[in-house]
Every structure is written in structure tokens, then in C-alpha cells.
Amino acid sequence: MSERWRYVDAGAVGPLQAMSQNGVLGGQVKAGAGPIVMTAVWGQTHLNVGWFDDVDATLDLDACRRLGVEVIRRPVYGGGTAFYEEGCAVMWGFFLPKDGGTLDEKLARFAPILLSTLERLGLGEVALEGSSDFRWNGRKLGALTAQDVGACHSVGGFLNIARPDLDLYLEVVRVPDEKFKDKVVKDMREYVCTAEEVAGHAVSYDDFRDALLASLGKAGIEVDPKPLTAEEKKGIDDVNAFLGSDDFVRRTSSERFTAAAPADARVGFGNHKGRKLCRAGVAIDEGGTIVAAMMAGDMHVSPSDTIDKVGEALVGASVDDRDDVRRRIASVFEAPEVDQAGDAMGVTTDDLLAAVDKAIAQAADDTKENA
């Protein structure tokens, strides 16, 4: 039996519109509208910071301002910081009720549909590898992720259809250590590839959209095109003002964390790459007690305050009691309400602990250097 879903062809969208639109559509699913599928193409060059990312670890914000590159932070949506040039990447999203299975089950359902879409476009050599990447000969063409975004479950991603200006990107980016630990190709200019390079011919947004809808139809999902309503557009405009603020972009910032730490505290940061990149920051007093902590990284975890709560739980821990540090992380991260696609892209308590260990070690090294 076939299903019938609402379909929104968003066309070319700017970053604030895209993020606000996702929230509005997710809200419709939560209200009982049923599943919704959306396709779009980036209509503005920008840098897109993941919800949990430490913006200072991934970007030089002064350089972004100097070069006129807009920076936004994705609300709720995880993953890493990405550079999108106008017209260079298509995207899609399936907004799904939470009662239709787990994130892993939904990812397993839609991965074959996306691979079928790629095959229709002449991209049959592309494989889904790593935690969430579409790769061709070790090079990244796009991504597919599944996450709980509060109002609903979201399975979505992007596909590079043209080559972005990576020289511009490399002028403003800071690549965290271990980011490329699991990558065959280490240089960013070589790592990113496009649909045209793989297929041997240009692939347009219209090509992708039509191929995706055909693959959905073959999988028993018929679409009912319904553009955004006037009320939905107003909701998008209302959210844009909030998302565009500097405070929102800097919600997770190692520079802010360092500035707010007690003057006599030792501060350290550490990264650990499991399936996804985890980052920790700690401020430690003279007695070896963690007096402030932050957690960040390229991850997809719900609820949206989970990683913040892990940082809060670490306050008061002794750096000499690693078992207690782990228990504090687990008390938050292993709670029943925490949700992620664990089979494909899950972050573990021990991943977070490893990042904290490295942050503590860096703080200790800094103390030795300054002694």
C-alpha cells in the first residue's frame, strides 16, 4: 500500500530561511500533519555551524566578517560546520512523526532511497560510508543524517552539485585536530567532490528533485505538492530575527568559555574522534576540581540541551577521579530520554570522556609550561 506525503519544493533558499522553514515544517508534523518531504538548493553563500559545534574551534569569525561571509548556527540540528556556496549544493529533508520507529530504523529505510536517487543521476559508484557521508573514492559528495529535532524525527542531507570556492573557505576555517582521522583523503581541496565529477555531466537541482521523487514513488511514497502557506511564511519570518543574532552564533564558544573562567583556573581543551568529533573544555582550580566545563562537537543528539547538561554535570568533579568523571557524563548522556542514531553515527559516554581526558591533560601541560 502506498503512502501519500506533503511535498514542499522550497527552491533556492538562504540559510536563515532554510533553518526557520525546517522548524515550521517540523511543527506541522508534531501537530499531526503527517510526514513531509522538502527539497531545496542553497541560494546564498554562507557558513553553517552545527548546533553543538564550538564556533571558535571551527571558524575565524573575524576573517568571516572581513571577507563578508555570513555565518549562521543551525538551531537544534547537529553535525559539523559546513561551507555552502550559492547554487553549489542541493538538500532534502524528511520530517517524520516520532511514533514511526527509531532513528536507526528510519535511516535504514531512507538510505536505499537516496542511493537509488544517486543511481538515477549517474552516481551509482557513490557509497554511504563513515558515520553519515556519501563518498566516492574516499572523497565526500554529501551526507545523510537522522536526528531527533524535538518536534519530530528528521532524515535529511545534502549533495554537492558544483564546486564551492574552497580557497575562500580555507581562509576562514579552523579544522579541529582529528577531524580527518577516519578520512582516506586528508586535504580539504581534494576531499570535496561534486556530482558532475562523478557522473561526467552536470547535475542540476531539478535533476536531483525529479530523481528523488521518482525513487520515493518506487518505494511506495507518493507526494502531494503543497507550497508554504502564508501563515507558515510568517512563522519563518518571526524565527529569522532570532537566528541571525551574534549571540546565537556564539552560543558554544571556547573564547567565551575561557573569558568567563575564574582568573586563577587552568583552562584546557581536547578533541576526540569516535564516529563523530567530540570536544571538551575544562577550567580547573588549584585543588584539581573542575569549576567549569563545556562540551561541543560534530554530533546529532537530542534533546538539544543534552551536551550542555553534560558540561554542567562535570562541575565539582576531581580530575583525579576518572570513574566519577565518567559517572557524571553517563548520568546525563545515558538517560532514557537521550536519543541519537546510535548504529551509524552515535557518540558514546566514552567518546565524551576521552575528550575530557585530553582537555584535563592540556590544562595540566599549560600549568607545567607556566611554572
Image: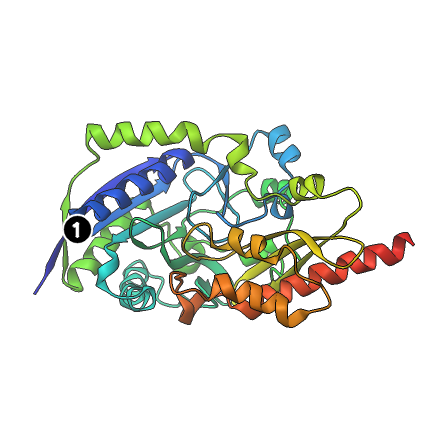
116 to the left or right of 258: left
Secondary structure state at the residue bearing disc 1: loop
Q: Quadrant of the N terminus?
A: bottom left
What residue sits 16% from the left and 40% below the top? 226
Tell me the kind of residue under disc 1. Gly
Res 221 quadrant in image: bottom left
The reply to whether residue 290 is visible in this rendering is yes
Q: Nearer the viewer, residue 126 or 288?
A: 288
Q: Residue furthest left?
A: 1
At label 1, counting other C-alpha atoms closer than 10 Å, the crowd grade (few under 14, some 14-19, many 20 or more) is: some
Look at the picture and state if 140 lies above or below 104: above
Please count the marks in the image.
1
What residue sits 20% from the left and 52% below the top? 35
Q: Which residue is mark 1?
A: 34
Look at the picture and state if 337 lies above or below 169: below
Look at the picture and state if 134 lies above or below 208: below
Whole-percent x, y for residue 333 in the image: 48, 63
122 to the left or right of 301: left
Res 109 quadrant in image: bottom left
257 to the left or right of 53: right
Whole-percent x, y for residue 178 in the image: 64, 62
Q: Nearer the viewer, residue 298 or 268?
A: 268
What residue sits 35% from the left and 66% below the top? 124
284 to the left or right of 58: right
